[in-house]
Amino acid sequence: MDGPRPAAPQPQRILIIKPSSLGDVVHALPVLAAARATYPRAHLAWLVGTSLAPLLAGHPLLDEVIEFDRRRYGRMLQSPRVLAEFVRFVRDLRRRRFDLVLDLQGLARSGFLAWATGARQRVGFRAARELAWVFYTLRVLAPAGDTHAVDKNAALARAAGLRLDTPEFPLGLRSDELDRARALLATAAGGPLPAFTAVVPGARWPSKQWPTEKFAELIDALHAASRPPVVLLGGPDERPLAAAIVRAVHAPVIDLCGRTNVRTLAAVLALAQQVICCDSGPMHIAAALGTPIVAVFGPTHPARTGPYAADAQVVSR
């Protein structure tokens, strides 16, 4: 009679694959926290897009950040040089000898990279798009219905053997980063800014954006109600949007749009009294930080991609 099967060896080297986007990377942070809590001595790495690598750089729970330049490698079929670079990238990935890979992206490219590691356990969703599931050794059934992305990631983590009860979102903000954010705010405001409302008007898709004139009306209403001053935030591409709002408002506005990197943006959101935004990456950062949120939603479904936080209100119709 056969005896009990020996327990599978604990993974020593774990890779999380979640290259993009900003909100999706934030949604994957509970998996990182769970991996570190379950395997405190394991080597933890994260494969992330080059533009988002600064968000994870120096993270206290990570041993390694592996940058994936999707835009450059996307040209490998047109450039032999880029193709050679991609082959070297894949070889280097395999040399790292990961034994557990969690593919939270679920696309053909991420599934292939999971397979390319040679890890004995490669975990992804059974319904992963672009046939990515063919690269996995463990295919997880995603929760049915309008399940939030955070809860779907948690289901995959649990199936992989990680202990994940209440999702935690460790962004790893340091005190010096908060101090630099305070200094930036003070410089822009002409003095210390103990309280402010952060307004993030941009979104990845134009269909997600609330009209400029509506943001201007809201900012004027906040000023008329003697609420804390408004600080506009966003990336460099959103400078024209912020400038249009500044021209439309009558109230004074502090415009920091395009003047922060992703870490400084997170620090400013951590200091804000409240965040008003659309469905965007900064919204998810604010939710992870526990900053109160009012989010204006358009075509996207709040149950699946809304702010994963208790102190958040979604306005939608």
Image (cartoon, grey):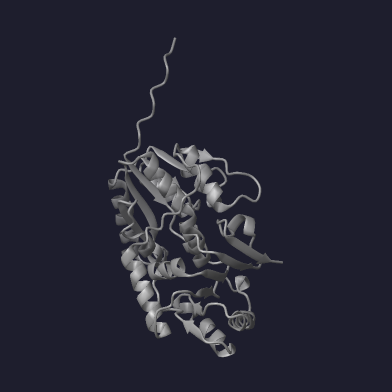
In front of the other: 100 or 93:
100
| Residue 193 vertical position relative to residue 3 in the rendered view, above or below | below
Report the label total: 0
Q: Quadrant of the C terminus?
A: bottom right
Q: Quadrant of residue 217?
A: bottom right
Q: Is residue 1 above or below residue 216?
A: above
Position of residue 43 in the picture relative to residue 203 (left or right): left
**Residue at x 53%, y 69% (from the top left corner):** 274
Residue 229 visible in image? yes
Front residue of 267/281: it is: 267
Which x, y percent locates residue 211?
Answer: 63, 79
Residue drawn at 36 percent across, 64 percent down:
54
Left or right, 5 with reference to 244: left
Query: Of residues 122 and 86, which is closer to you in this image?
Result: 122
In the displayed orientation, state which residue is furthest to the top: 1
State the image coordinates of residue 221 (x, y, percent, origin top left).
63, 81
Picture layout, residue 190 above or below residue 166: below
Q: In percent of the image, x 33 and y 60: which residue is there?
A: 57
Q: Position of residue 168 (x, y in %)?
A: 46, 50
Residue 69 visible in rendering: no
Residue 120 at x, y = what percent? 38, 37
Residue 294 occupies which quadrant of the picture? bottom right
From the viewer's perspective, is residue 186 above or below residue 140? below
Nearest the eye: 206 or 229: 229
Quadrant housing the N terminus: top left
